[in-house]
Amino acid sequence: MQSLLRLLQDGQFHSGEELGAAVGVSRAAIWKRLQALEAEFDLQVHKVRGRGYRLETPLSLLDIDLLTASSSFPVILLQQVDSTNAQALRHLASGAVPPFLVIAEQQTAGRGRRGRSWASPFGENLYYSLVLRVSGGMRQLEGLSLVVGLALLQALREAGVENAGLKWPNDLLVDGRKVAGILLELSGDPADICHVVIGIGVNINMRVAPRDEAIDQPWTSLRQVVGGQVDRNGFVASLNRQLQHYLQLHQTHGFASLREQWEANHLWQGRAAVLAAGLQSVQGRVLGVDDTGALRLEVEGQEKVFSGGELSLRLRDDS
Ligand code: BTN
């Protein structure tokens, strides 16, 4: 299946003969294989008499050799998985030693923050889970997800997205639309030795929301912003590099050293906002973050600090 898709990913016509020879089946059997591909990965293949077959939409498939070459840790590339974060946690539980990276072409149960799902169609976006060992206690986790946001922001800029910014705690937005998200999951004892799964989802080449999954917030993709297909292997290489740089700074100097840079890229600095935690909410003006990455809000003239993975921030209508 993979070799067929690899040939077809350019979106050009390929004859049944060429495809049959490449995968070692008869010309007649090719159409059956292509129909199976269509069903499995929700793809559309066009068949034109005399010209052959082509994918309706070209793909930029992930390539394990390129991914490995750009990573300083082992890479596991899966075609389909429930969630790369879940897979990374299972891999840890079965004794795998971090650091390692799990990437998939498709997630069938991608996880977002606050119990949401994350739309994860085949071959279009990036589903990336990096597992690291954390041995410095809580301090090494403070502000970590915000630092990952900064690294991701730089990778987006390298890919040509100039007007991306951050929204506390770790959403990446372009013109008010979400382009990427981060979900950290811990395993072990945060006060002692633990492991962190840094889950990153980036809408790279997505044009439309997947048929069976409505996306419950405004979204965009790199393709929509830069106006053309983006090389996903190249994007991973850039993300690996930026993460290495920022994680190193974070480990050595802590979040405090990156706080100013984070605030400079925070889209909602100074804005009137509502912070929601379940059914409770607090209104205030966004002052920024503190040295642990917690949100600083001015509430009725006083500075208040909020932290926690279940919080979400939205703009107040009148801001
Ligand atoms: C968010 O809600 O903003 C966080 C989205 C995180 C999605 C990524 S995709 C790779 C990794 N695996 C998952 O199941 N979730 C994260």
Image (tube, rainbow, N blue to C red):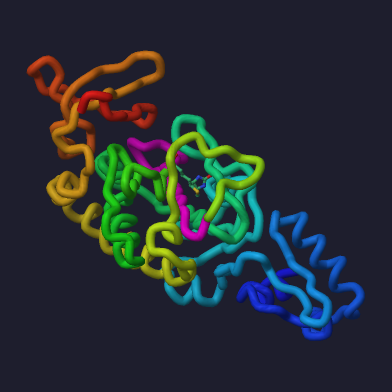
**161 or 187: nearer the viewer:** 161
Give x and y (percent) for residue 191: 33, 36
* Residue 162 visible in image: yes
Per the picture, the main secondary structure of the magenta-coloured stretch is: strand
Q: Nearer the viewer, residue 91 or 227?
A: 227
Q: Picture quarter containing residue 167?
A: top left
Number of numbered discs on residues: 0
* Residue 58 x/y as whole percent: 60, 69
Q: Which residue shows up at 44% across the image and 54% down it? A: 221
Q: Position of residue 100 (x, y in %)?
A: 48, 60
User: Taking 288 as reference, is 133 above or below it?
Assistant: below
From the image, which quarter does the C terminus lie in?
Answer: top left
Q: Is residue 296 left or right of residue 245?
A: left
Q: Which residues are magenta?
A: 183-206
Residue 308 falls inside the magenta stretch: no
Q: Is residue 184 magenta?
A: yes
